[in-house]
Image: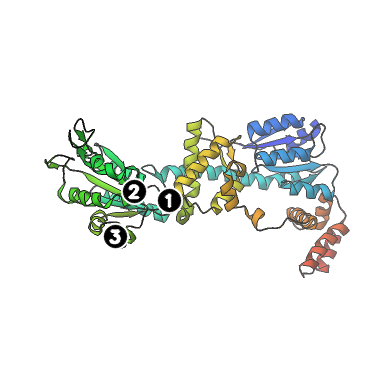
Amino acid sequence: MPDSPIKLLAIDDEPESLEFIQDALTEPGLEVLTSTDPEEGWRIVRRSHPEIVLLDLRMPKVSGMELLERIVDFDPAIDVILVTGDYSTESAVAAIQKGACDYLTKPFSPKVLRQRVGSLLADARKRHRTVELEGELLETSRFEGMVGRSPLMLEVFARIRRVAPHYRIALVTGATGTGKELVANALHKLSPVAANRLVVCNCSAVAETLFESELFGYVRGAFTGATQDRIGLVEYANGGTLFLDEIGDMPLPMQSKLLRVLQNHELQRVGSPEVRRVDIRVVAATNRDLRAMIAEKQFREDLYFRLSMVEIKLPRLADRKEDLPLLVQHFLARFAQEYNKPFRGLTRRAQALLSRYSWPGNVRELENVLGNACMMAEGDAIDVRDLPEALRQEAPLKEDAEETPLTLEEVEYRHVRRVLDWMGGNKVHAARALGISRATLYSILREKATGQDEAVPEAEADSAKLG
Protein backbone atom coordinates (compact mmCIF):
# COMPACT_ATOMS: atom_id res chain seq x y z
CA MET A 1 0.00 0.00 0.00
CA PRO A 2 1.51 3.40 -0.94
CA ASP A 3 2.49 5.78 1.83
CA SER A 4 -0.11 8.45 2.62
CA PRO A 5 1.01 11.88 1.36
CA ILE A 6 2.28 14.62 3.65
CA LYS A 7 -0.20 17.49 3.76
CA LEU A 8 0.96 21.10 3.65
CA LEU A 9 -1.54 23.95 3.96
CA ALA A 10 -0.73 27.49 2.77
CA ILE A 11 -2.98 30.30 4.05
CA ASP A 12 -2.46 33.70 2.41
CA ASP A 13 -4.92 36.35 1.25
CA GLU A 14 -2.81 36.91 -1.91
CA PRO A 15 -3.61 34.30 -4.61
CA GLU A 16 -0.27 35.02 -6.34
CA SER A 17 1.62 33.93 -3.21
CA LEU A 18 -0.36 30.69 -3.05
CA GLU A 19 0.37 29.94 -6.72
CA PHE A 20 4.07 30.59 -6.09
CA ILE A 21 4.09 28.24 -3.08
CA GLN A 22 2.19 25.53 -4.94
CA ASP A 23 4.56 25.68 -7.94
CA ALA A 24 7.68 25.72 -5.74
CA LEU A 25 6.63 22.77 -3.57
CA THR A 26 5.12 20.42 -6.15
CA GLU A 27 6.71 17.01 -5.57
CA PRO A 28 5.63 13.38 -5.19
CA GLY A 29 4.30 12.48 -1.76
CA LEU A 30 3.35 16.06 -0.86
CA GLU A 31 -0.22 17.33 -1.06
CA VAL A 32 -0.38 21.14 -1.06
CA LEU A 33 -3.66 22.67 0.13
CA THR A 34 -4.33 26.41 -0.15
CA SER A 35 -6.79 28.98 1.14
CA THR A 36 -7.08 32.76 0.77
CA ASP A 37 -9.54 32.96 3.68
CA PRO A 38 -8.13 32.43 7.21
CA GLU A 39 -11.43 31.09 8.55
CA GLU A 40 -11.65 28.59 5.70
CA GLY A 41 -8.00 27.73 6.33
CA TRP A 42 -8.84 27.06 9.98
CA ARG A 43 -11.63 24.70 8.90
CA ILE A 44 -9.16 22.88 6.63
CA VAL A 45 -6.75 22.49 9.56
CA ARG A 46 -9.44 20.85 11.68
CA ARG A 47 -10.71 18.69 8.82
CA SER A 48 -7.48 17.60 7.11
CA HIS A 49 -4.84 17.79 9.88
CA PRO A 50 -1.91 19.00 7.75
CA GLU A 51 1.57 18.30 9.06
CA ILE A 52 2.88 21.72 7.94
CA VAL A 53 1.16 25.12 7.68
CA LEU A 54 2.56 28.18 5.87
CA LEU A 55 0.72 31.10 7.41
CA ASP A 56 0.71 34.73 6.29
CA LEU A 57 1.07 37.14 9.21
CA ARG A 58 -1.13 39.98 7.94
CA MET A 59 -4.57 38.96 6.68
CA PRO A 60 -8.04 40.52 6.92
CA LYS A 61 -10.61 39.24 9.45
CA VAL A 62 -8.17 37.02 11.36
CA SER A 63 -4.48 37.80 11.86
CA GLY A 64 -1.83 35.15 11.28
CA MET A 65 -0.76 35.41 14.92
CA GLU A 66 -4.29 34.64 16.14
CA LEU A 67 -4.60 31.72 13.75
CA LEU A 68 -1.18 30.47 14.87
CA GLU A 69 -2.46 30.31 18.45
CA ARG A 70 -5.55 28.36 17.35
CA ILE A 71 -3.49 25.84 15.39
CA VAL A 72 -0.94 25.26 18.17
CA ASP A 73 -3.73 24.86 20.72
CA PHE A 74 -5.60 22.45 18.40
CA ASP A 75 -2.58 20.26 17.62
CA PRO A 76 0.93 21.19 18.81
CA ALA A 77 2.37 18.56 16.44
CA ILE A 78 1.61 20.79 13.42
CA ASP A 79 4.68 22.70 12.24
CA VAL A 80 3.75 26.30 11.47
CA ILE A 81 5.92 28.66 9.39
CA LEU A 82 4.86 32.29 9.65
CA VAL A 83 5.31 34.34 6.47
CA THR A 84 5.37 38.14 6.24
CA GLY A 85 6.48 40.97 3.99
CA ASP A 86 7.17 43.24 6.98
CA TYR A 87 9.88 41.67 9.13
CA SER A 88 10.40 42.86 12.66
CA THR A 89 12.36 41.26 15.46
CA GLU A 90 9.38 41.69 17.79
CA SER A 91 7.01 39.78 15.51
CA ALA A 92 9.56 37.01 14.96
CA VAL A 93 10.07 36.64 18.70
CA ALA A 94 6.32 36.66 19.32
CA ALA A 95 5.75 34.02 16.62
CA ILE A 96 8.35 31.67 18.06
CA GLN A 97 7.05 32.14 21.60
CA LYS A 98 3.52 31.29 20.42
CA GLY A 99 4.69 28.04 18.80
CA ALA A 100 5.86 28.81 15.26
CA CYS A 101 8.83 26.72 14.17
CA ASP A 102 10.09 29.21 11.56
CA TYR A 103 9.64 32.73 10.21
CA LEU A 104 10.00 33.65 6.52
CA THR A 105 10.31 37.14 5.09
CA LYS A 106 8.86 37.92 1.64
CA PRO A 107 10.06 37.86 -1.02
CA PHE A 108 11.89 34.55 -0.95
CA SER A 109 13.09 32.29 -3.72
CA PRO A 110 11.73 28.80 -4.49
CA LYS A 111 15.08 27.41 -3.36
CA VAL A 112 14.84 29.08 0.06
CA LEU A 113 11.24 27.90 0.48
CA ARG A 114 12.15 24.32 -0.43
CA GLN A 115 15.10 24.43 1.99
CA ARG A 116 12.97 25.65 4.87
CA VAL A 117 10.16 23.20 4.21
CA GLY A 118 12.49 20.32 3.31
CA SER A 119 13.62 19.50 6.85
CA LEU A 120 10.03 19.60 8.11
CA LEU A 121 8.97 17.26 5.31
CA ALA A 122 11.76 14.85 6.22
CA ASP A 123 10.63 14.87 9.87
CA ALA A 124 6.99 14.35 8.86
CA ARG A 125 7.93 11.38 6.65
CA LYS A 126 9.91 9.87 9.50
CA ARG A 127 6.89 10.22 11.77
CA HIS A 128 4.66 8.56 9.16
CA ARG A 129 7.11 5.70 8.80
CA THR A 130 7.44 5.40 12.57
CA VAL A 131 3.66 5.02 12.91
CA GLU A 132 3.68 2.31 10.24
CA LEU A 133 6.55 0.47 11.90
CA GLU A 134 4.91 0.74 15.31
CA GLY A 135 1.75 -0.78 13.82
CA GLU A 136 3.76 -3.68 12.42
CA LEU A 137 5.66 -4.05 15.69
CA LEU A 138 2.44 -4.03 17.70
CA GLU A 139 1.13 -7.01 15.73
CA THR A 140 4.26 -8.99 16.57
CA SER A 141 4.19 -7.85 20.21
CA ARG A 142 0.78 -9.21 21.14
CA PHE A 143 0.63 -12.35 23.24
CA GLU A 144 -2.71 -13.72 24.41
CA GLY A 145 -4.18 -10.29 25.15
CA MET A 146 -0.93 -8.86 26.51
CA VAL A 147 1.42 -6.43 24.76
CA GLY A 148 5.16 -6.09 25.25
CA ARG A 149 8.59 -6.22 23.64
CA SER A 150 10.72 -5.41 26.67
CA PRO A 151 13.10 -8.12 27.93
CA LEU A 152 11.05 -8.45 31.13
CA MET A 153 7.81 -9.13 29.28
CA LEU A 154 9.43 -11.39 26.70
CA GLU A 155 10.66 -13.50 29.60
CA VAL A 156 7.12 -13.62 31.04
CA PHE A 157 5.71 -14.71 27.67
CA ALA A 158 8.40 -17.38 27.28
CA ARG A 159 7.71 -18.72 30.78
CA ILE A 160 3.97 -18.94 30.11
CA ARG A 161 4.62 -20.88 26.89
CA ARG A 162 6.90 -23.33 28.70
CA VAL A 163 4.64 -23.81 31.72
CA ALA A 164 1.15 -23.86 30.20
CA PRO A 165 1.20 -27.41 28.74
CA HIS A 166 2.38 -29.00 32.00
CA TYR A 167 1.43 -27.05 35.12
CA ARG A 168 -1.18 -28.17 37.65
CA ILE A 169 -0.80 -25.25 40.09
CA ALA A 170 0.72 -21.82 39.39
CA LEU A 171 1.14 -18.58 41.33
CA VAL A 172 1.08 -15.21 39.57
CA THR A 173 2.50 -12.28 41.54
CA GLY A 174 2.73 -8.60 40.76
CA ALA A 175 1.48 -5.17 41.73
CA THR A 176 -2.12 -4.12 41.15
CA GLY A 177 -2.81 -3.43 37.49
CA THR A 178 0.06 -5.41 36.00
CA GLY A 179 -2.18 -7.97 34.24
CA LYS A 180 -2.34 -11.03 36.50
CA GLU A 181 -5.75 -12.10 35.19
CA LEU A 182 -4.44 -11.92 31.62
CA VAL A 183 -1.67 -14.35 32.61
CA ALA A 184 -4.25 -16.70 34.10
CA ASN A 185 -6.25 -16.54 30.87
CA ALA A 186 -3.12 -17.27 28.83
CA LEU A 187 -2.15 -20.24 31.00
CA HIS A 188 -5.62 -21.71 30.60
CA LYS A 189 -5.84 -21.02 26.87
CA LEU A 190 -2.49 -22.68 26.17
CA SER A 191 -3.12 -25.65 28.47
CA PRO A 192 -4.54 -29.06 27.47
CA VAL A 193 -7.86 -28.11 29.17
CA ALA A 194 -8.41 -24.95 27.10
CA ALA A 195 -11.70 -26.32 25.75
CA ASN A 196 -13.13 -26.51 29.28
CA ARG A 197 -14.11 -23.79 31.74
CA LEU A 198 -11.96 -21.09 33.30
CA VAL A 199 -13.74 -20.27 36.58
CA VAL A 200 -12.83 -17.08 38.45
CA CYS A 201 -13.07 -16.51 42.20
CA ASN A 202 -12.19 -13.05 43.52
CA CYS A 203 -11.16 -13.89 47.07
CA SER A 204 -11.26 -10.25 48.20
CA ALA A 205 -14.94 -9.96 47.24
CA VAL A 206 -16.25 -13.02 49.15
CA ALA A 207 -17.52 -12.60 52.72
CA GLU A 208 -15.64 -14.81 55.19
CA THR A 209 -18.82 -16.54 56.36
CA LEU A 210 -19.73 -17.47 52.76
CA PHE A 211 -16.31 -18.57 51.59
CA GLU A 212 -16.71 -22.31 52.17
CA SER A 213 -20.11 -22.59 50.51
CA GLU A 214 -18.93 -20.39 47.61
CA LEU A 215 -15.90 -22.60 46.91
CA PHE A 216 -17.24 -26.05 47.79
CA GLY A 217 -21.02 -25.71 47.49
CA TYR A 218 -23.62 -27.07 49.93
CA VAL A 219 -26.45 -29.53 50.22
CA ARG A 220 -30.08 -28.86 51.02
CA GLY A 221 -30.65 -28.18 54.72
CA ALA A 222 -26.96 -27.46 55.48
CA PHE A 223 -27.96 -24.08 56.96
CA THR A 224 -30.91 -21.75 57.08
CA GLY A 225 -31.86 -20.78 53.56
CA ALA A 226 -30.19 -23.77 51.89
CA THR A 227 -33.34 -24.97 50.15
CA GLN A 228 -31.56 -26.97 47.47
CA ASP A 229 -28.17 -28.46 46.61
CA ARG A 230 -25.71 -26.02 45.07
CA ILE A 231 -22.42 -26.72 43.30
CA GLY A 232 -19.35 -24.72 44.38
CA LEU A 233 -16.77 -22.99 42.17
CA VAL A 234 -14.16 -25.74 42.66
CA GLU A 235 -16.53 -28.46 41.49
CA TYR A 236 -17.86 -26.23 38.72
CA ALA A 237 -14.30 -25.91 37.40
CA ASN A 238 -13.84 -29.70 37.28
CA GLY A 239 -11.94 -30.62 34.13
CA GLY A 240 -10.83 -27.01 33.60
CA THR A 241 -9.05 -24.21 35.46
CA LEU A 242 -9.88 -22.39 38.70
CA PHE A 243 -8.46 -18.86 39.00
CA LEU A 244 -8.17 -17.66 42.61
CA ASP A 245 -7.60 -13.93 42.35
CA GLU A 246 -6.18 -12.11 45.41
CA ILE A 247 -5.38 -15.37 47.20
CA GLY A 248 -3.75 -13.34 49.98
CA ASP A 249 -7.23 -12.26 51.14
CA MET A 250 -8.42 -15.83 51.72
CA PRO A 251 -9.19 -16.48 55.44
CA LEU A 252 -6.84 -18.86 57.25
CA PRO A 253 -9.51 -21.57 57.92
CA MET A 254 -10.25 -21.70 54.19
CA GLN A 255 -6.57 -21.97 53.34
CA SER A 256 -6.30 -25.36 55.04
CA LYS A 257 -9.38 -26.64 53.19
CA LEU A 258 -8.01 -25.39 49.88
CA LEU A 259 -4.74 -27.15 50.62
CA ARG A 260 -6.60 -30.45 50.95
CA VAL A 261 -8.16 -29.93 47.50
CA LEU A 262 -4.73 -29.22 45.99
CA GLN A 263 -3.11 -32.24 47.64
CA ASN A 264 -5.84 -34.89 47.43
CA HIS A 265 -8.10 -33.53 44.67
CA GLU A 266 -11.06 -34.04 46.99
CA LEU A 267 -13.75 -31.80 48.46
CA GLN A 268 -16.90 -32.00 50.55
CA ARG A 269 -19.92 -29.80 50.09
CA VAL A 270 -21.06 -27.96 53.22
CA GLY A 271 -23.40 -30.24 55.19
CA SER A 272 -22.46 -33.40 53.27
CA PRO A 273 -20.22 -36.32 54.36
CA GLU A 274 -19.72 -37.34 50.75
CA VAL A 275 -16.21 -36.89 49.34
CA ARG A 276 -16.14 -35.76 45.71
CA ARG A 277 -13.17 -36.09 43.38
CA VAL A 278 -12.15 -33.16 41.19
CA ASP A 279 -9.54 -32.76 38.49
CA ILE A 280 -8.66 -29.11 38.14
CA ARG A 281 -5.76 -26.81 37.37
CA VAL A 282 -5.37 -23.88 39.78
CA VAL A 283 -3.92 -20.46 39.09
CA ALA A 284 -3.63 -18.19 42.14
CA ALA A 285 -2.73 -14.52 41.97
CA THR A 286 -1.81 -11.88 44.51
CA ASN A 287 -0.36 -8.39 44.82
CA ARG A 288 0.70 -9.03 48.41
CA ASP A 289 3.96 -10.33 49.85
CA LEU A 290 2.97 -13.84 50.90
CA ARG A 291 6.31 -14.50 52.60
CA ALA A 292 5.78 -11.48 54.85
CA MET A 293 2.25 -12.69 55.57
CA ILE A 294 3.65 -16.10 56.55
CA ALA A 295 5.98 -14.41 59.03
CA GLU A 296 2.97 -12.59 60.49
CA LYS A 297 0.92 -15.84 60.67
CA GLN A 298 -1.57 -14.52 58.10
CA PHE A 299 -0.86 -17.10 55.42
CA ARG A 300 -0.10 -20.81 55.61
CA GLU A 301 3.46 -21.69 54.68
CA ASP A 302 2.52 -25.15 53.38
CA LEU A 303 -0.11 -23.60 51.09
CA TYR A 304 2.42 -21.09 49.80
CA PHE A 305 4.91 -23.82 48.91
CA ARG A 306 2.18 -25.78 47.16
CA LEU A 307 1.08 -22.73 45.14
CA SER A 308 4.54 -21.44 44.29
CA MET A 309 5.81 -24.58 42.60
CA VAL A 310 5.47 -22.51 39.43
CA GLU A 311 5.64 -18.74 39.99
CA ILE A 312 5.29 -16.04 37.33
CA LYS A 313 6.25 -12.53 38.43
CA LEU A 314 4.91 -9.54 36.52
CA PRO A 315 6.97 -6.33 36.30
CA ARG A 316 5.63 -2.86 37.02
CA LEU A 317 5.01 -0.57 34.06
CA ALA A 318 7.69 1.77 35.43
CA ASP A 319 10.21 -1.06 34.99
CA ARG A 320 9.30 -1.60 31.34
CA LYS A 321 8.79 1.93 30.03
CA GLU A 322 10.00 0.79 26.58
CA ASP A 323 6.61 -0.94 26.20
CA LEU A 324 4.70 2.30 26.80
CA PRO A 325 4.37 3.37 23.11
CA LEU A 326 3.09 -0.09 22.13
CA LEU A 327 0.59 -0.14 24.99
CA VAL A 328 -0.61 3.35 24.07
CA GLN A 329 -1.14 2.30 20.46
CA HIS A 330 -2.88 -0.89 21.58
CA PHE A 331 -5.36 0.96 23.80
CA LEU A 332 -5.95 3.79 21.32
CA ALA A 333 -6.86 1.26 18.62
CA ARG A 334 -9.25 -0.46 21.01
CA PHE A 335 -10.95 2.73 22.17
CA ALA A 336 -11.15 4.07 18.63
CA GLN A 337 -13.22 1.04 17.71
CA GLU A 338 -15.20 1.09 20.96
CA TYR A 339 -16.11 4.80 20.76
CA ASN A 340 -16.22 4.93 16.95
CA LYS A 341 -13.70 7.79 17.00
CA PRO A 342 -10.52 7.51 14.88
CA PHE A 343 -7.30 8.55 16.62
CA ARG A 344 -3.96 9.38 15.00
CA GLY A 345 -2.15 9.04 18.28
CA LEU A 346 -0.73 11.39 20.92
CA THR A 347 0.81 14.80 20.42
CA ARG A 348 4.52 14.99 21.17
CA ARG A 349 3.99 16.87 24.41
CA ALA A 350 1.38 14.31 25.56
CA GLN A 351 3.86 11.51 24.80
CA ALA A 352 6.50 13.33 26.85
CA LEU A 353 4.08 13.69 29.76
CA LEU A 354 3.17 9.98 29.77
CA SER A 355 6.84 8.97 29.62
CA ARG A 356 7.62 11.11 32.71
CA TYR A 357 4.77 9.75 34.82
CA SER A 358 5.52 7.01 37.37
CA TRP A 359 2.36 4.90 36.70
CA PRO A 360 1.68 3.61 40.23
CA GLY A 361 -1.46 1.89 38.91
CA ASN A 362 0.52 0.22 36.13
CA VAL A 363 -1.10 -0.93 32.86
CA ARG A 364 -4.62 -0.71 34.28
CA GLU A 365 -4.07 2.96 35.14
CA LEU A 366 -2.73 3.61 31.63
CA GLU A 367 -5.81 1.94 30.17
CA ASN A 368 -8.13 4.09 32.31
CA VAL A 369 -6.23 7.29 31.50
CA LEU A 370 -6.38 6.67 27.76
CA GLY A 371 -10.00 5.54 27.86
CA ASN A 372 -10.99 8.78 29.57
CA ALA A 373 -8.79 10.85 27.23
CA CYS A 374 -10.37 9.26 24.16
CA MET A 375 -13.81 10.19 25.42
CA MET A 376 -12.78 13.78 26.21
CA ALA A 377 -10.70 14.50 23.09
CA GLU A 378 -12.32 16.84 20.57
CA GLY A 379 -9.88 16.07 17.76
CA ASP A 380 -8.22 12.88 16.58
CA ALA A 381 -5.02 13.41 18.56
CA ILE A 382 -4.74 13.09 22.34
CA ASP A 383 -3.13 16.20 23.84
CA VAL A 384 -2.03 17.15 27.36
CA ARG A 385 -5.34 18.93 28.03
CA ASP A 386 -7.18 15.61 27.49
CA LEU A 387 -5.20 13.86 30.25
CA PRO A 388 -6.26 13.81 33.93
CA GLU A 389 -5.25 16.81 36.02
CA ALA A 390 -3.60 14.59 38.65
CA LEU A 391 -1.26 13.16 36.01
CA ARG A 392 -0.39 16.65 34.69
CA GLN A 393 0.44 17.82 38.20
CA GLU A 394 2.66 14.85 39.11
CA ALA A 395 4.59 14.72 35.81
CA PRO A 396 4.76 18.30 34.48
CA LEU A 397 6.48 18.81 31.18
CA LYS A 398 10.10 19.81 31.40
CA GLU A 399 9.56 23.26 30.02
CA ASP A 400 6.90 23.89 32.66
CA ALA A 401 8.75 22.34 35.57
CA GLU A 402 12.43 22.99 35.13
CA GLU A 403 12.98 25.83 32.68
CA THR A 404 12.34 29.53 33.20
CA PRO A 405 10.62 31.46 30.38
CA LEU A 406 12.98 32.61 27.64
CA THR A 407 13.93 36.27 27.52
CA LEU A 408 13.30 38.24 24.33
CA GLU A 409 17.04 38.37 23.77
CA GLU A 410 17.33 34.59 24.04
CA VAL A 411 14.46 33.99 21.60
CA GLU A 412 15.97 36.55 19.19
CA TYR A 413 19.37 34.90 19.38
CA ARG A 414 17.99 31.39 18.83
CA HIS A 415 16.04 32.55 15.79
CA VAL A 416 19.13 34.24 14.33
CA ARG A 417 21.22 31.10 14.91
CA ARG A 418 18.56 28.93 13.25
CA VAL A 419 18.44 31.12 10.15
CA LEU A 420 22.24 31.29 10.09
CA ASP A 421 22.43 27.48 10.13
CA TRP A 422 19.95 27.28 7.24
CA MET A 423 22.13 29.68 5.27
CA GLY A 424 25.16 27.47 5.77
CA GLY A 425 26.80 30.02 8.09
CA ASN A 426 26.71 32.84 5.51
CA LYS A 427 25.96 35.94 7.57
CA VAL A 428 25.27 38.15 4.55
CA HIS A 429 22.50 35.86 3.33
CA ALA A 430 21.20 35.33 6.87
CA ALA A 431 20.94 39.09 7.48
CA ARG A 432 19.11 39.53 4.16
CA ALA A 433 16.64 36.72 5.01
CA LEU A 434 16.05 38.22 8.45
CA GLY A 435 15.53 41.70 7.03
CA ILE A 436 18.19 43.26 9.24
CA SER A 437 21.58 44.81 8.61
CA ARG A 438 24.78 42.83 8.94
CA ALA A 439 25.84 45.15 11.76
CA THR A 440 22.67 44.22 13.69
CA LEU A 441 23.30 40.52 13.06
CA TYR A 442 26.91 40.81 14.32
CA SER A 443 25.69 42.75 17.35
CA ILE A 444 23.18 40.03 18.32
CA LEU A 445 25.77 37.28 17.99
CA ARG A 446 28.50 39.26 19.76
CA GLU A 447 26.30 40.18 22.73
CA LYS A 448 25.32 36.57 23.26
CA ALA A 449 28.88 35.34 22.87
CA THR A 450 30.05 37.93 25.41
CA GLY A 451 27.44 36.70 27.87
CA GLN A 452 28.83 33.18 27.46
CA ASP A 453 32.46 34.31 27.88
CA GLU A 454 33.15 33.50 24.26
CA ALA A 455 34.52 35.65 21.48
CA VAL A 456 33.25 36.10 17.95
CA PRO A 457 36.36 35.77 15.78
CA GLU A 458 37.07 39.01 13.95
CA ALA A 459 38.35 37.04 10.99
CA GLU A 460 34.97 35.36 10.70
CA ALA A 461 33.20 38.70 10.82
CA ASP A 462 35.53 40.16 8.23
CA SER A 463 35.06 37.26 5.85
CA ALA A 464 31.30 37.60 6.24
CA LYS A 465 31.51 41.30 5.37
CA LEU A 466 33.31 40.42 2.15
CA GLY A 467 30.26 38.26 1.28
Residue at 65% across / 33% down in the picture? 46
Name which of mark 1 and mark 2 comes first in the sequence.
Answer: 1
In the depicted structure, whether residue 399 falls above or below residue 208: below
In the picture of the structure, the residue carrying the numbered disc 1 is: 149
In the picture of the structure, the residue carrying the numbered disc 2 is: 246
- Residue type at mark 3: give it: Lys
From the viewer's perspective, tell me whether residue 34 is left or right of residue 3.
right
- Residue type at mark 2: give it: Glu
Find the distance from the CA under tag 1 to the CA under tag 2: 27 Å
**Residue nearer the viewer, 360 or 116:** 360
Secondary structure at badge 1 equals: loop
From the viewer's perspective, tell me whether residue 177 is left or right of residue 302.
right
Residue at 54% across / 32% down in the picture? 341
Residue at 51% across / 30% down in the picture? 340
Find the distance from the CA under tag 1 to the CA under tag 3: 39 Å
Name which of mark 3 and mark 2 comes first in the sequence.
Answer: 2
Quadrant for the C terminus, please: bottom right
x and y percentages locating residue 134 in the rendered image: 49, 45
Task: Pick out the residue farthest to the left.
Answer: 274
**Residue nearer the viewer, 205 or 460:** 205
x and y percentages locating residue 409 in the rendered image: 80, 57
x and y percentages locating residue 14 in the rendered image: 81, 32
